[in-house]
Amino acid sequence: MKALAPLLAPIWFAQLFTGAKSFLDNPLIGSTRLNAMGLHVARLRLAHGMTAWRRAKLTAAVRPDDRAMFDRDGVVEIRNFLPADTFAALRQQILAHRGPARETVQGDTITRRLAIDPTARLAIPAFKQFQKDRRWRALARYVAGFDIEPLLYIQSILPLRHAAAPDPQTRLHADTFHPAMKAWLFLEDVPLESGPFAYVRGSHRLTPERIAWERERSLHVRDGDCRLSARGSFRIEPGELAGLGLPQPTRFAVPANTLIVADTFGFHARTMASLPATRIELWAYGRRNPYRPLTGWDIWSLPGIAERRVALRWWLGDRMAGIMPQSWRPVGRKGPADD
Ligand SMILES: [Fe+2]
């Protein structure tokens, strides 16, 4: 990489103004010297400031109780989210659907995703009821801090399927240095045994304690032994939480038809499953360059384009396979409940 440094330096510099987060892949982001001078903390502060600015413009459509819960905890749990008949239809249509699936293996766990592309939308007409739900639309946008259409997948988590180390997603972590939205609508009950989502309430806030912790991590993370932390998703031990004024994580063992929307700058994890039960969910993701001042103007949110984004991302990923490692491999046509 050293020989190419003069060519790559402008790209590395430009990446400072994006959501780029890897301390390994960008020597400026990973620089101990620059981070000692405050680079990582400056990126954090600016990204969080811009998100607060954009969120302020997206408050009007959000229910006050949802907003209060989110602002306090960084995560919103809504039980019985869809009307019972709509949920029953959605669940039945999703479970009956088969389509081109992708899988990745992390530790002992398989994650499978199916795109909700135009074909899937025809097979799952009830999906439209969820997508156009006003409470969902407003909350997803507020948490993302952008007026964008989230990426949506049918996701299955299949824990304990490989004789391997535990799933690395079971360690508490922040996805990245800036606010970002993820959401789950669970299609089945999620008992404690199946490894539910866990979240440290209040950990979405950029407090002085968190800033100090981030600064310290930014000085050493590149050379540490945790690759995922070095790539910008900082892991944290439960024993460190009290020092940041944070509680222990809440485990969301919830019934089917519960919606959870979270800011994944907050510390979260999958908890360790004790049973190899498959968890099936609608999964959403909303993230853009955190420094953008505008909430909207997203070409990818336009009808006709939005529902084809996942297929396009996969296609592009396949083309780039020789240059960048691709973790989502095609596994043929599958249903979300297949083993
Ligand atoms: Fe995560």
Image (tube, grey):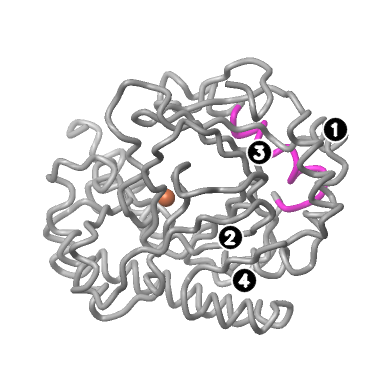
How far separated are the C-alphas under marks 4 and 2? 14 Å
How far separated are the C-alphas under marks 1 and 2? 25 Å
Give the position of the N terminus as an image quadrant. Answer: top left
Q: Secondary structure at mark 3?
A: strand
Amino acid, disc 1: Ala
Q: Crowdedness of circle 3 by 10 Å Cα count: few (<14), some, many (20+)?
A: many
The residue where tag 2 is placed is: 260
The residue where tag 4 is placed is: 142
Depicted 211 relative to depicted 160: above or below:
below
Residue extent of the magenta highlight: 301-314
Q: Is mark 4 within 8 Å of ligand 1?
A: no
Q: Is residue 126 left or right of residue 205?
A: right
Q: N-terminal of the two: label 1 or label 2? A: 1
- Residue drawn at point x = 17 percent, y = 51 percent: 221
The residue where tag 3 is placed is: 154
Q: N-terminal of the two: label 2 or label 3? A: 3
Residue 312, magenta (yes or no)? yes
Image disc number at residue 123: 1
Q: Crowdedness of circle 2 by 10 Å Cα count: few (<14), some, many (20+)?
A: many
Q: What secondary structure prevails in the magenta region?
A: helix
Q: Are marks 1 and 3 in contact (CB under 8 Å)?
A: no
Amino acid, disc 3: Ile
Q: Crowdedness of circle 1 by 10 Å Cα count: few (<14), some, many (20+)?
A: some
Where does residue 81 sit, x and y in percent of width and height? Answer: 72, 62
Q: Secondary structure at mark 1?
A: helix
Q: Of 82 and 27, which appears nearest the observer? A: 82
Q: Of 136 and 141, which appears nearest the observer? A: 136
Q: Secondary structure at mark 4?
A: helix
How far separated are the C-alphas under marks 1 and 3? 13 Å
Q: Are marks 2 and 3 in contact (CB under 8 Å)?
A: no
Q: N-terminal of the two: label 4 or label 2? A: 4
Q: N-terminal of the two: label 4 or label 1? A: 1
